[in-house]
Image (cartoon, rainbow, N blue to C red):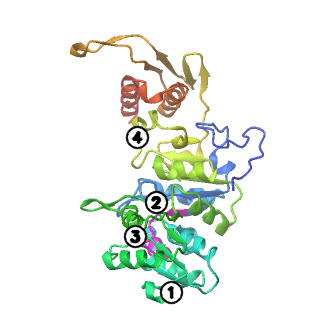
Amino acid sequence: MTGSITSEADPDPGLTPLAGATRPLVELFDTGLFDLDGVVYVGADAVPRAPEELKRARAEGLRVTFVTNNASRTPDAVVDHLRKVGVAASVDDVVTSAQAAARLVADRVPAGSRVLVVGGEGLLVAVRERGLVPVASAADDPAAVVQGFHPSVGWRNLAEGAYALARDIPWVASNVDRTLPTDGGLAPGNGTLVEVIRLATGKMPVIAGKPAPPLFHETVERVGGRRPLVIGDRLDTDIEGAHAAGMPSLLVLTGVTTLDDLVAAPPNHRPTYLADDLAGLFTTHPAPRREPNGARCGAWTATIEDASRDDGAAGRSSRARVRLSGSGDPMDGARALLSAVWATDDPGEIDAAEALEVLRAHRKSMG
């Protein structure tokens, strides 16, 4: 379901990390699949300038969609949250993992089938939307089990799911996020609850949400996108999911992922494009140029050195490190650094601390 980009100046980037773009991304892609928390808002507050950037993206022709792993809320509830933080949205702009899960169930059972729902309102609405009949008990002889997070899910709901799966029927989970951020800290997520049923039954569900492909495919199909771009802040859901779905991605640094995290990122966690925030949709993205011992991007150069260094009481270490020098756009520095490190056999073994500190100091000096 990847889109094809036909411009000679900007060929289809595929899944190439830091592919580069000589034109703004809003000119290259027709549909943006935006993650929510960390990209559009953080809790009850909008990410700075995100509402304005989304409005501008729409004005420049990008079809803006909002893609969420949260199966507990209906699209109406998501729209209400978006409007409260200043982002215009309608239910047609929102696709949830509950909706993707309901489609997977509908593809596996006859129309009008009873489906045991282990979850809340978001999943109930999505199941009904597909013409299926939600039930709460294995005694209702369901044709499938569908599971998604909701705070009300308890032992009885999990037990009914396990009872139903004894008959070897399809089991679909909205997502398997192990934790859920709350005001009180990290709480057990749907993945933890899925694990309870898995341990009880020995069965494995089909996964609908990120990082699995179905949620991305569901979104593109609903809006008729031809050249989709995934925009997210998490490597293990947004970027990994984009790779799994075969779609290019833009990582923004407004959420949980830092440049430190990116240095050791495995290939399926490496984004096609990188930006500080959603303003990256409206800029070009220089592609780093590989050099024999590193990489260059803009006015920045990253060089891999194998020199020994003094580690004080720990003695001498021959761990390779990367040196970074240059000026100008710090994102170019990040691209050079990442390209150099990712070209090595084992990025996780490269000491990038000094280079990252150079970038942090430069970004701070630029305000």
Callout 1: 10 Å neighbours few (<14), some, many (20+)? some
**Residue receiving disc 2:** 36
Residue count near mark 2 (Cα–Cα under 10 Å), binned few <14, some 14–19, many ≥20? many
Image quadrant occupied by the C terminus: top left
Task: Check disc 2 and give the amino acid type.
Answer: Leu
**What amino acid is labelled 4 in the image?**
Thr
**Residue 79 location, x and y as percent?**
48, 72
Question: Magenta segment range?
Answer: 66-79
Query: Does the residue at mark 3 contact the one at mark 2 (Cβ under 8 Å)?
Result: no
Q: Are marks 4 and 2 in contact (CB under 8 Å)?
A: no
State the CA–CA distance, disc 3 to disc 2: 17 Å
Pick whichever of labels 3 and 1 is earlier in the sequence: 1
Q: Is residue 360 above or below residue 151?
A: above
Residue hosting label 3: 149
Looking at the image, is mark 4 or mark 2 earlier in the sequence? Answer: 2
Of marks 3 and 1, the one in the foreground: 1
Residue at image mark 1: 141
Q: CA distance from mark 4 to mark 1?
A: 48 Å
- Residues 251 and 235: in front is 235
